[in-house]
Amino acid sequence: SVIALSLWTHSAWTMIGHHVCHGGYNRTAPSGRYSSRGFAIGSLGRRIVDWFDWMLPEAWSVEHNNLHHYRLGEDSDPDLLERNAETWKGNEKYTMPFVSMLLWKWAYYAPNTYKEMKVAELRRQGKPLPDGFDPQAPLTLSNLAAGKGKGIFSVWEFVRRVIGPYFLARFFLLPLPLALVNPAFFASAVVNLALADVLSNIHGFIVIVTNHAGSDLYRFQVGCKPKSPTFYLRAVTSSANFDTGSDLNDFMHGWLNYQIEHHCWPDLSMRAYQKGQPELKAICEKYGVPYVQENVFVRLKKTLDIAMGLTNMRRYPREWEMEKDIMVWSEERARMETA
């Protein structure tokens, strides 16, 4: 039951929430039921019915669909593991990667995605960020409790709006009917749900964090225009695919084993990635573009090496960039003007 519950949670995020929110199924239902413009957003009810997880879907869309997708491998990519791991010092470098596997969705991803949404709101309103606040630094739950999110959002706001509803529904309301039968059944269900959450965290870490980390993938010093030739080159050279091909294999990878294709064409369906992957790989091989595809556990080892500081990402030489594709993001331009 723990494995089944874990796979339910994992697949709801990686396959349903992820691909629907990217627009991969915008045209499948005339009713708009699976349109990215309304799926899981706008109300708690829609979140519960469509995709209920630790992260707030609106915040995840800002962090993932916008910042990560269009700034892949840049310093302003919020999912850049090598930069985020710089906060770990001493023995933390060797222990925190494994601790993170167990709890990263609620301890890191939920608060950090919410931070990105709140920062984006402040910038749209023309309001300055609090003095000393680094928008590129990861905001974990422990950092939030230590007051490092002051001026952005409070612990109470985060609990009330982001993780609180999920915690109550998942670990109290869902198993509550069993308490009417036997309190021991309720307790057993809560334990199973907690274990499934840990297992889902581990599963997610293995197939998600590994997508863009390794000594054979590139980091970039400057931004690039979306959908430019440089943008597509980066989608390939800063991403790694895993084993692909069969439905069962792809299900266990959450369909994230087509990461290169996903970053080139974010609004395709899962079936379309299966069909397009061999063609894109052949194009890259024809023109000598590095196309990284390895077993997920090989990628996990390379990811842990990056997190522990044992290896480094490749730095893409600035002089190799196509100047016509280069751009400076608005907030970075403002920072340089005030420096």
Image (tube, helix red, strand yellow):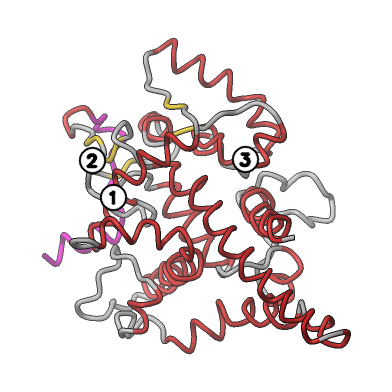
Q: Sequence-wise, which precedes: disc 3 or disc 2?
A: 3
Residue that numbered label 3 is attached to: 255
Q: CA distance from mark 2 to mark 1?
A: 8 Å
Q: Badge 2 local density, few (<14 within 10 Å), some, or many (20+)? A: many
Three-letter amino acid code of the residue under disc 1: Glu
Please tell me which residue is depicted at 45% across the width and 58% down the height of the picture.
101
CA gap, disc 3 and disc 2: 27 Å
Q: Give the residue at mark 2.
A: 312
Please tell me which residue is depicted at 22% across the width and 43% down the height of the picture. Answer: 310
The tag earlier along the polypeptide, 1 or 3, is: 1
Which one is in front, 217 or 220?
A: 217
Report helix, strand or loop for mark 1. Answer: helix
- Sequence order check, earlier mark of 2 and 1: 1
Amino acid type, mark 3: Trp
Residues drawn in magenta? 321-339
- Point out which mark residue 242 bears: none
